Amino acid sequence: MDEFFQKLRRIQKKERSESGLARVGDDFYERVHSYIEDLLDAVGNDPFAKEHYLIRDTQRIATEICERREHKITDSAVMNVQRSYHLFNGRPQFDLQDTTPLNMTPEEEELYFSLVETLREFRARIIPSIDVESGTRDSGAKDDAPRKDVLDGSETLTDPSTSVKTDKGVKGREEDIETVLIFEEVPARIMGVDEKVYGPFRPQDIVTLPSLNANVFINAKKGRRIRYS
């Protein structure tokens, strides 16, 4: 029994120090359960049995191992879905990269793939509700209808005089380019009014954007216009 307890301690140290999952074997959780059952049998009705302390420590260590592995598996599922399903693409598609974590038990594999599927379904469900200009319009849309720009899903441009084309087909002010110093991280990409994709952005990035998109950053206090003499 003590040998298995020492193995648990070694696994605990690896889970603390390594970013990936420690190798535990496919039957790890079954062995933990059997080990604790054996300790309970050894204790019996003796309230002074030394195994009481061993049971307590085993449960504490096993719980930490399980929770740390859950965090790693969950983080990996979220990261892989975010890499594979880009919300701000014109036509987002799900193409899961083969980066499944190593050393998972069968129970953990089931958890991982169920998380991936849940996140995939969630992103597929919310995509239609995100208003990103993809170069196509409804048949009833007017040429001078206000366009919407996406920044954290909240900024809307409502000035009809700044539309891409006037009734005569002449391009408006949206062709102007501005240089902006970014203040805050914007992890998502945005669709510019010129129908080009920009971003993601990091603090202190210096980027060039169409003036209307640049104004969204500036008005939201997420960036500052830079002028060169």
Image: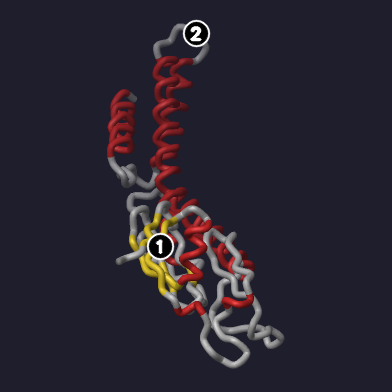
Farthest residue toward the front?
Answer: 229
Q: Position of residue 96 (x, y in %)?
A: 43, 67
Residue furthest to the right in view is 140
Q: Vertically, is 121 above or below 171? A: above
Q: Residues within 10 Å of mark 1 (few under 14, many from 20)?
A: few
Query: Foreground residue, 117 or 221?
Result: 221
Q: Residue at x 52, y 82 (%)?
A: 172
Q: Position of residue 147 (x, y in %)?
A: 60, 74
Query: Which residue appears at 38% of the width and 47% of the height?
Result: 26
Q: Amino acid at mark 1?
A: Pro
C-alpha distance separating marks 2 and 1: 61 Å
Which of the labelled discs sits on residue 47, or is there none? 2
Q: Taking the image as drawn, is residue 93 in sight?
A: no
- The residue lying toward the viewer, choosing from 131 and 220, is 220
Residue beneath disc 1: 200
Residue 11 visible to the viewer: yes
Amino acid at dot 2: Pro
Dot 2 crowding, Cα within 10 Å, few <14, some 14–19, many 20+: few
Give the residue at x 33% y 53%.
102
Against 180, is 210 above or below?
A: below
Q: Position of residue 130 (x, y in %)?
A: 60, 67
Give the image location of residue 168, x and y in percent.
60, 93
Q: Quadrant of the N terminus?
A: top left
**Which of the 4 image quarters holds residue 205?**
bottom left
Mark 2 element type: loop
* Identity of the residue drawn at 56% across and 58% down: 118
